[in-house]
Image (cartoon, helix red, strand yellow):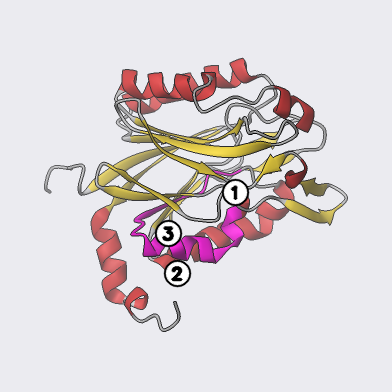
């Protein structure tokens, strides 16, 4: 077997968290996970949406930071110190609106440089049932409606967040921009995750013939807020190759370039498109 190279295989670690309201406590967990994952040979350590804080809306606003703030800068230092890429799934980014923030994801390279910033486009305004009512747009501004696709060590990674998963046009635009990997850090609710999480992740992988990495929040956070967990890696054929379950922890997977080419050769659907 040939030796692994950056061009052939990317080893990813998906860190499933149950983040709370205390930023410092959550950052301690993030630091510990980066150390552990780097020691286990990860090339990219990925965290879920709201990794640094999952708190009631008022506290989210009061603790918001710029990209240059403590949460992102700590992740930059960790990436540089442990020679790994880091995907900070999202944090609350200060905006020019004092009543609303951005829900922002950043991708950091091994040198500790932020190489991509993505602000969540689709906001979670839903009324599923008595236990699943959210209006994210009350406190969050949407980002610009365009895909963000970044180069990481020869791989093209598309940045998305949670509720974006329900909007296939975003992923098709990312595919058109050359995405090899679709990143979906999330805090999917337990109610919707049980029925929609896996099928949507697999659908996005299949229809775009791309790898999907989806680090997730799990467990109870505050009040009745409960996240589904089940962090997942899906290959371009739609097969779930790694999954965490419902508890905190890490799941590893090797993202293999030849599987992209194989899926696209077997069914060259991306070249058969008639509508653009």
Residue for point 77% across, 32% down: 57
The mark nearer the N terminus, 2 or 3, is 3
Can I make out residue 239 in this image? no
Residue 163 coordinates in the image, percent (x, y): 63, 52
Residue 133 counted in the magenta span: no
In the rendered structure, the answer to whether residue 42 lies left or right of residue 61 reads left
The spot of residue 156 in percent (x, y) is 33, 51
Picture residue at 52% right of the left edge, 66% below the top: 169
Element class at badge 1: helix
Left or right of residue 8: residue 245: right
- Residue 162's disc number: 1
When the figure is inspected, residue 80 is found, relative to residue 214, above or below; the finding is: above
User: Callout 3: 10 Å neighbours few (<14), some, many (20+)?
Assistant: many
Location of residue 154 with respect to 264 vertically, above or below: above
Of the residues under marks 2 and 1, which one precedes in the sequence? 1
Q: Nearer the viewer, residue 48 or 91?
A: 91
In the image, is residue 81 above or below residue 152?
above
Secondary-structure class at tag 2: helix
Q: CA distance from mark 3 to mark 1?
A: 16 Å
Mark number, residue 174? 3
| Left or right side of 18 for 191 | right
The residue segment tinted magenta is 164-186
Labelled pair 2, 1 in contact (Cβ < 8 Å): no
Q: Quadrant of residue 246?
A: top right
Q: Nearer the viewer, mark 2 or mark 3?
A: 3
């Amino acid at each position: 077997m040939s030796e692994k190279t950056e061009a052939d295989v990317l080893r990813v670690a998906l860190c499933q968290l149950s983040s709370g309201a205390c930023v410092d406590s959550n950052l301690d967990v993030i630091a510990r996970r980066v150390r552990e994952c780097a020691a286990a040979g990860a090339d990219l350590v990925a965290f879920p949406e709201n990794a640094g804080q999952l708190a009631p809306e008022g506290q989210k606003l009061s603790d918001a930071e710029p990209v240059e703030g403590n949460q992102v800068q700590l992740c930059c230092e960790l990436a540089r110190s442990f020679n790994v890429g880091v995907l900070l799934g999202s944090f609350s980014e200060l905006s020019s609106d004092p009543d609303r923030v951005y829900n922002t994801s950043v991708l950091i390279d091994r040198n500790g440089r932020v190489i991509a910033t993505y602000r969540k486009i689709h906001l979670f305004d839903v009324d599923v049932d008595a236990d699943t009512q959210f209006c994210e747009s009350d406190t969050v501004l949407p980002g610009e409606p365009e895909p963000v696709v970044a180069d990481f060590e020869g791989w093209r990674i598309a940045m998305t967040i949670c509720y974006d998963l329900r909007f296939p046009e975003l992923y098709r635009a990312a595919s058109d921009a050359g995405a090899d990997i679709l990143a979906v850090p999330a805090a999917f609710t337990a109610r919707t995750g049980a029925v929609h999480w896996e099928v949507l992740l697999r659908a996005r992988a299949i229809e775009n013939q791309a790898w999907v990495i989806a680090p997730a929040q799990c467990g109870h956070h505050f009040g009745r807020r409960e996240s589904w967990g089940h962090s997942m890696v899906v290959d371009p054929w739609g097969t779930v190759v790694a999954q965490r379950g419902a508890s905190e922890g890490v799941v590893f997977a090797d993202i293999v370039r030849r599987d992209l080419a194989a899926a696209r050769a077997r069914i060259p659907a991306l070249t058969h498109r008639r509508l653009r």
